[in-house]
Image: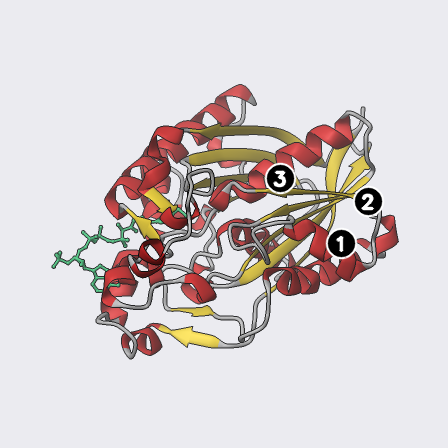
Amino acid sequence: MIRSVIAGIGSFVPPKVVTNDDLAQRMTTSDEWIQTRTGIRERRFAEEGVSCSDLALEATRKALEDAGMTASDIDFIIFATLSPDHHFPGTGCYLQAKLDAAPVGCLDVRNQCTGFLYSLATADAMIRAGLYRNILIVGSEVHSSALDFSDTGRDVAVLFGDGAGAVVLSAGDDPERGVLYTELHADGRFAKALHLDIWDISKKPYITPETVTSGAIWPRMEGKTVFKHAVTRLCESIVRTLEVNRVRPEEIKYVIPHQANMRINQMVAQKLGFPEEKFLHNMQRYGNTTAASIPLLLDETYRQGFLEKGDLLLLAAFGAGFTWGTALLRW
Ligand code: ACO
């Protein structure tokens, strides 16, 4: 039976560290407010001129090296981002050109914080269907260029950071390893609870002097709505994943959750009765890197030597859309 396995993984964050105190120079906020409500201490911001596909390229190079492959071994690219290089074409195409990997197919996934899981599920299905052998999946974000650092946007601006994570998902036949299960969900009734208003691109005209000056160019969020739904949906999805796969919580080595807010993840762990130390975090150092957060955390966990072959991992994410999902895999 063909099963998809992570053959290589890598991540990259830009070197510039932006602390909570740095943000407090730009808006009315404090290290205490941000840490208490989110757990975030600092994040990375890309320098001017560095794009989403630039960060993705660095993460990809590390993933290819880890897999012992070159770009010529990749036969499809799936790119997850909400901060693309351009509105179109997809950022996967820009990355493919930088890798000199034409003419492999490129698919952009626009599912925000759940983007990596949607990409993983899609790549897994493609590999099991026998369509491709080595799919590059990348989650990459440059948020820092498109946040409102005024007091109006401070609830959103303090949360996000820049970074990228990449995996090479390959066809394998080792029954001890691979993606075992994925589930994906969405509820578009909450699309406007976290969204960017100006890109109502199907409405004419969508760029007017008013839309530019109104603040509609910045992401806006109903924080409490997002928080409440994140906890509920993540709990439901994790419980179902365990039930469907007949897995007991103690069999899971680690939960690798999306890194949006420490309190969300702690609350989920608590409600499910998981020991908190099974829920891994690095948002303290990187903030919310959206589509990059899960591969970034998985890569750090792997490189720190915490993962052994056969470990059972549960990946879970919730984000704008709303979208959410889980994946169960044996490392
Ligand atoms: N610094 C200081 N004060 C702030 C800040 C800030 N950065 N942001 C908001 N405030 C103020 C508000 O103006 C408000 O002031 P008021 O009481 O005078 O009106 C006060 O703090 C409380 O604001 P709330 O919005 O009620 O604060 P809350 O406790 O809900 O925390 C937060 C806000 C941290 C955003 C929380 O709602 C949250 O984490 N929600 C989930 C967000 C999330 O996870 N988003 C990402 C997931 S989706 C994705 O990843 C794409």
Relative placement, left or right, of 29 versus 20 is: left
User: Looking at the picture, how far across and down is residue 331, in whole percent?
Assistant: 67, 43
Looking at the rendered structure, which numbered label has been put on residue 96? 1
In this figure, which residue is indicated by the disc labeled 3?
119
User: Looking at the picture, how far across and down is residue 17, in whole percent?
Assistant: 47, 76
* Quadrant containing the N terminus in the rendered view: top right
User: Looking at the picture, how far across and down is residue 152, in whole percent?
Assistant: 24, 61
Residue sitting at x 37%, y 68%: 41
Q: Amino acid at mark 1?
A: Gln
Q: Amino acid at mark 3?
A: Ser
Q: Nearer the viewer, residue 305 or 96?
A: 96
Does the beta carbon of the residue at mark 1 sit less than 8 Å from ligand 1? no
Query: Nearer the N terminus, badge 2 or badge 3?
Result: 2
Residue sitting at x 46%, y 38%: 202
How many numbered discs?
Answer: 3
Residue sitting at x 53%, y 71%: 46
Q: Nearer the viewer, residue 211 or 192?
A: 211
In this figure, which residue is indicated by the disc labeled 2?
104
Query: Nearer the N terminus, badge 3 or badge 1?
Result: 1
Q: Are marks 2 and 1 in contact (CB under 8 Å)?
A: yes
